[in-house]
Image: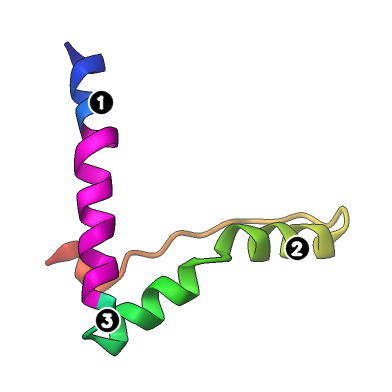
Amino acid sequence: MSLIWMLLYNLLVVPVIYSGFFIGSLFNSKIREGLKARKNQFAWLESEIIKADGRKRILFHCTSAGEWL
């Protein structure tokens, strides 16, 4: 049963949410900047990891106020 929900979520809900953000970015500069900042985040992270070159790394995740509201 959970496989069905996972497929529904990934094939229906995620695209609808992404489309909503894309349409919202046409009217709201904060949404547009947020999407632009996230566009290459994994490439940026990978380049930063390569720069570390064997040094120890610690990854922190800090919640924003929006995650608590």
Going from N to C along the chain, the mark reached first, 1 or 2, is 1
Mark 1, Cα crowd under 10 Å, few <14 / some 14-19 / many 20+, is: few
Dot 3: few (<14), some (14–19), or many (≥20) neighbours within 10 Å? few
Q: Is residue 11 magenta?
A: yes
* Mark 2 or mark 3: whose residue is earlier in sequence: 3
Residue found at x 27% / y 48%: 15
Helix, strand or loop at mark 1: helix
Q: Main secondary structure of the magenta part?
A: helix
Q: Which residue is mark 2?
A: 47
Which segment is the magenta one? Answer: 9-24
Magenta span includes 20: yes
Q: Are marks 2 and 3 in contact (CB under 8 Å)?
A: no
Q: Of 50 and 52, which appears nearest the observer?
A: 50
Q: Which mark is residue 21?
A: none
Closer to the N terminus: mark 1 or mark 3?
A: 1
Circle on res. 6: 1
